[in-house]
Image: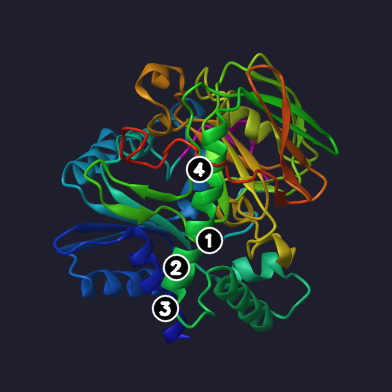
Amino acid sequence: MTDRFSRLAELAVYGANVQEGQIVIVNAEIGLEEQARATAEAAYKRGAKFVDVVYFDPYVKRVRIEHADPDTLDFVPQWYGERVLEHAEQNGARINLRGVTAPNLMDGLDKSLLGKDRLPSVKETFKVFDERSMNWGFVPGPHPAWATLVHPDLPAEEAYEQLWRELEHVLRLDEPDPLVAWDERIAVLNDHAQRLTERRFDAIELHGPGTELTIGMLPTAAWTTVEFSTAKGLRHIANLPSEEVFTTPDPRRTNGHVTATKPLVLNDGTIVRGLRVRFENGVAVEIDADENAEVLRSLTGIDESARRLGELALVDGEGRIGPLDTVFYDTMLDENASSHIALGNGFPFLIEDEDRTGVNKSATHIDFMIGSPELDVDGITLDGERIPVLRNLAWQLPARTGAVNLSREGRGFRW
């Protein structure tokens, strides 16, 4: 088991591209100590100057929501944000371990209060991500409680082993050289991102069971993968595993309705099932669900932009997460099983200067999955031509002969 934690840790520091002399923050929940320690060790082996492991206790969050004055639940001490900004000022690295350590912990609480306490998220994190002032990455952190949530029909030990096997598969840790395997997969996704960017679609239409949605694009929007670069040009992979190609849309031009195809698991572990959202002129005017719709409504009441779109991501059928047909109850994994959209903050670095002010700005970012083999995706040109993009999870856009160079440097800016 120790070797498993070490291999996952090596992938984590590779994805975040930890540099010699950097200060590294490792964020983890209570319960992920062994993975956090292995990650700290891997970071030190790469030359980190200092590794600061920050643990969040979801049980403390529960007692706060249960007993604190409701009017204080949105309070975050100033130094939480200052810490994030100071770390970014020093060009540090950040590794976030994601996993479910306490399933259904928030059951029984007033659902209207759950969205008010957003910790461990703080708004300053979006600022430093947008400014590209740090190299960072997310990786899953296996936990026995997570395993029993994903595989409730298996005995606990078997469930934990099964979760590990699945995570090793989707992380490509079962490959002879996982790092090379990820470089190859990211290169394929980068090619699809460039083809989408070259088209400069005016809108994207999505048609499928329970979904009829038109999402307007900003004129200079680029599509990308999770292969990012900091403002100083340091490459890093922001999320592993990742199978998505994504952009940030025009927050004013989303219309229609959409139905989630997988459960949405919020940061506090709340599971939103059967999510349905209707948009008018960019705003989510109706949010309904079979379970816990009130929590999502509360979260999206944090500011006036929280009910507008900040992301559209497309996922093909060639990745490893979707074919497993496993619901991991973790958005960072499940979103890479299928195409998805996100309410809240967008990505200004994907838009050129003249259009950047049009990107959605919010203190939240909530992804939910809408993709399936039945979802047809079309690009709409400025003159109204409809061009197939995805059919049955397969890309439809051919490479264009003599296309303009829209590589990262070719677009006149670096990520």
Q: Quadrant of residue 130?
A: top left
Q: Which residue in the protein does label 1 denote?
A: 99
Is residue 113 magenta-colored?
Answer: yes
> Which of the numbered marks, if any, corresponds to residue 32?
2
Are circles 2 and 1 on residues that touch, CB within 8 Å?
Answer: yes
Foreground of the two, 68 or 197: 197
Disc 1 versus disc 4: nearer the observer = 4
Tell me where residue 346 appears, x and y as whole percent: 47, 30
**Above or below — where is 187 with respect to 163?**
above
Magenta-highlighted residues: 108-118
Q: Which residue in the protein does label 4 denote?
A: 194
Mark 1 neighbour density, 10 Å: few (under 14) some (14–19) many (20 or more): many
- Which three-letter amino acid code belongs to the residue tagged 1? Gly
Q: Main secondary structure of the magenta part?
A: loop
Q: Residue placed farthest to the top in the image?
A: 281
Name the N-terminal-most of marks 2 and 1.
2
**Above or below — where is 384 with respect to 390?**
above
For the residues labelled 3 and 1, the Cα–Cα distance comes to 17 Å
- Which three-letter amino acid code belongs to the residue tagged 3? Arg
Is residue 175 magenta-colored?
Answer: no
Q: Residue placed farthest to the front in the image?
A: 402
Q: Which residue in the protein does label 3 denote?
A: 7
Mark 4 neighbour density, 10 Å: few (under 14) some (14–19) many (20 or more): many
Disc 4 versus disc 3: nearer the observer = 4
Tell me where residue 303 appears, x and y as whole percent: 50, 21
Q: Is residue 137 left or right of residue 171?
A: left
What residue is at 53 percent from the left and 53 percent from the top? 189
Foreground of the two, 311 or 196: 196
